Amino acid sequence: MANDWLLLFPEKVRALLSALPASLLDKVEEIRVREGRPLEINYSGGKYHFLGTDKGLTIRPEEAYKPDREDTHRLLDLISNHSLYTMEEELRKGFITIPGGHRIGLSGRTVLSGGGVEHLRDITGFNVRIAREMPGIADAVLPYLFDRGQQRMLHTLILSPPQHGKTTLLRDLARQISAGGSGREGIRPGLKVGIVDERSEIAGSRRGIPAFDVGPRTDILDGCPKAEGMMMMIRSLSPDVLIADEIGRAEDAEAVTEALHAGITVVASAHGKEVSELARRPALGGLLEHRMFERYVILHRTEKGLSFRILDGQKRGLLLVSPEERLGGDRHA
């Protein structure tokens, strides 16, 4: 069913959300449920409203519905499939990814062990991020990431702040790279793609089966740490292209370097506004210094939608696309 993510919510919250116009529900990016505080929705264009009890959307917190203890307990029960004790690793990380690729950030009281977070308890805050499939969003980008002479994908890093479309773009790149096709870049053969989907957001797999179309020649390691997953892919699945979301740790950089030295193209994403920011990050600075990436795609959201810039490996501009020419829409990942 359309907007089946509504079933995640307890009955009272679901009824309020379901009463919103379908055109608005299609733009919803986040629903923030905080016990005893206003129910908030965030949607395309960086806009937000509170959800009123009988007046629909409101900007006035005092008019908003305030989820109670029953709501938050019921929500936690639904998203954990009635088995919270089986999700210790997710609670330690502070988020749960559910079938469909929707990610739910959690807040509450942390329990520490050995100086680190062991898990969360007294969970009273939820940030439900809605994942959506957008076929064609990579159409304008892909020709600049493919080497027609060598018939291969170029090593690419996609860069943006959170909620600017990195995962959505990666998902469609996986689909198109795997399927092959033709366009401004000429005939492009379908390639073997390996996705290391640590947060289960790219493919949205359920019991190993992707919920999103990520292409006919794509293999997925779901819920696997990126660095370990990339090495597993290299050893056993012989991908032509490795795809990973939000690299940033030293072990991620080592795995990327290993893949590149093995002749495998890496298409990955990272948080940041500009390439220059990454150079100051210890884990990623070395990749930039040694020019491991041949293309950089920088995403930026404006009030009109999503724009992007493409730079070559020496950080020279190749293309700038405005929201009016954008790559298919303005929804997040």
Image: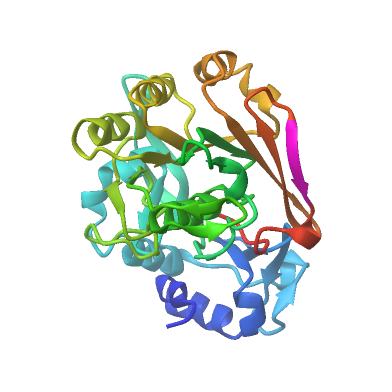
Q: Which is nearer the eye, 107 or 144?
A: 144
* Residue 122: x %, y % from top left: 40, 48
Q: Please say whether residue 174 is visible from this viewpoint.
A: yes
* Residue 233: x %, y % from top left: 26, 36
Q: In this view, does 262 lie to the left or right of 14?
A: left
Q: Is residue 44 above or below residue 19?
A: above
Q: What residue is at 72 percent from the left and 75 percent from the top?
A: 57
The picture quadrant where one finds residue 294 is top right
Q: Which is nearer the eye, 308 or 155?
A: 155
Mark count? 0
Q: In this view, does 26 lie above or below 224?
A: below
Residue situated furthest left in the rendering: 236
- How are the residues colored? rainbow
Q: Is residue 83 left or right of residue 295?
A: left
The secondary structure that dominates the magenta segment is strand
Residue 201 in the magenta stretch? The answer is no
Looking at the rendered image, the quarter that the N terminus falls into is: bottom left
Q: Is residue 294 above or below residue 200?
A: above
Q: What residue is at 55 percent from the left and 53 percent from the top?
A: 186
Q: In this view, does 250 lie to the left or right of 41?
A: left
Q: What residue is at 34 percent from the left and 38 percent from the top?
A: 92
Q: What residue is at 63 percent from the left and 64 percent from the top?
A: 40
Tell me which segment is drawn in magenta: 317-321
Looking at the rendered image, the quarter that the C terminus falls into is: bottom right
Q: Please say whether residue 39 is visible from this viewpoint.
A: no
Q: Is residue 43 above or below residue 247?
A: below
* Residue 136: x %, y % from top left: 56, 63
Q: Which is nearer the eye, 192 or 49?
A: 192
* Residue 169: x %, y % from top left: 55, 52
The picture quadrant where one finds residue 139 is bottom right
